[in-house]
Image (cartoon, rainbow, N blue to C red):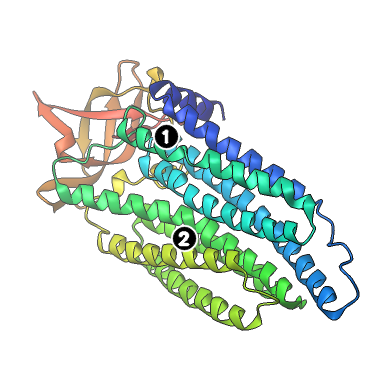
Amino acid sequence: MFTITRILKQRAHANRWILLFLGITILQLLISMINLITNTRFSSPKNLGQTLAAIQLAEVLKHRLHRNIMESAWIFMFQVWRLWVGLDGIIRGDRPPVIVAGVSTIWTIAMSAIQIVISRMLINHGMNEVYPQLVMSGVLIGISAPIFIVVVMLVKNSSWTSTPDLGPDPNMKNMYNCISRFLVLSKCGIFFQFLLMLFHGVFMKDIGFQPWNWVLFIPLPILSLVFMLTGQKAIAAESSPLMIIFILYQACFLAYNSCMIWWGEGHMVYNTWIFLYTYSGVAMILCLLTLLTSIRCLANFGKGIQPFVKTGLFNGKNATDLSDGDAEMAFATAPMTLEINEKEETPNKHNNNLIVNSVIEITTNSQINRSVKIWIQAPKTRFENGTLTYIYRVTKKNQYQAV
């Protein structure tokens, strides 16, 4: 935790727009939390009369209040998700997650606008206690707009980013960008697949709760999360079987979500739930993009991009190097001897770059000798006077990690 805090301070020092980005995002989170707490205090509609029309109207308003609480809860969770994605991108020095965290504010604005419309409808029927929600939804929209400017400034300034040296080969850059898109889309899946399935469980209760519903809508979100992690593992290990499983899951999710939209339309109680349709529609678009990107990533397996993959903060050899920018763990060069064990590993060529998985011995100025297994790409080494020089860095676990 101390290291992460230190990294955040270093990033913020390199680019002051990061502080503004985090400040606005946290403020959005706090406002949505207050909005949720306020909504849970709403009372049922007052007695509108004993006529059949009045009784039906009271039931509709009561139902709308229940939906209002659910929408506010998911808007709050969306702000938590955005903050997590933004922090992940800032700590790793990666632009795409930060861009997604900023641009996804569009969804916040759209959902807040829907709540404003609903609040005005409830107020017109005498439910003046929803005025706080009307005000807070407007404030949430107001503070969300400036974040687009902040994201543009962050993208223009690369002082906080950390991008690996991929060499001059454009194919390597294209493959790296493809993997970056996949990782961002998989993070989107946490909210637009995992949490959407939980929301479908709430929807089932909305149309008439049955005990067997939760038998379906508790395991499904858990399985969804497992499959999302499977996709990350497939990328990190370049495992074709795991990626095929992930692709099949995405196809199944598309079919499942389509069925829920079609089935829900025929069972909608009182009126159409716009929030649900918007949520499901965005989820389907993102799922389709994830599916197409997954297929493209699968085609890139075995082409030399694996050593540069960073799937997350704490994922073993593919983890983010939290020592980036730390003076005690800076880049350096050191002499080493290279030994290839022909029985274990066979060198292969790709795009005229010799790539081997080899055992090396590194001797540093501190006289630390350590044998480690890393990937070596020929353009990153130089051989002079019988000494192979390689760029390395020391990770938190005192192991040498290839740059």
Q: Amino acid at mark 2?
A: Thr
Q: Residue furthest top?
A: 365
Report x, y in % for residue 200. 63, 69
In the foreground, 60 or 69: 60
Q: Earlier in the sequence, mark 2 or mark 1?
A: 1
The mark found on residue 230 in the picture is 2
> Could you say whether the residue bearing mark 2 is in a helix, strand or loop?
helix
Name the residue rendered at 48%, 29% in the picture: 20
Name which residue type carries label 1: Val
Above or below: residue 199 compared with residue 363: below
Give the crowd class for mark 2: few <14, some 14-19, many >=20 residues within 10 Å: some
Viewer-nearest of labels 2 and 1?
Answer: 1
Q: Which mark is residue 127?
A: none
Quarter of the image where the N terminus is located: top right
Report the front residue among 226 and 98. 98
288 sits to left or right of 212:
left
- 273 left or right of 306? right
**Which residue does the image show at 35% across and 63% down from the upper left?**
294
- Residue 359 percent location from the top left of the image: 28, 39
Query: Where does residue 241 sit, x and y in percent of width and height?
Result: 38, 68
Q: Is residue 385 left or right of residue 277?
A: left
> Which of the 4 quarters of the picture holds residue 116?
bottom right
Q: Which residue is mark 1?
A: 150
- The answer to whether the residue labelled 2 contacts the one labelled 1, judged by CB atoms less than 8 Å apart, is no
Picture layout, residue 76 above or below residue 69: above
Judge whether 251 appears above or below 233 on screen.
below
Q: For mark 1, give the secondary structure.
A: helix
- The alpha-carbon separation of the residues under discs 2 and 1 comes to 33 Å
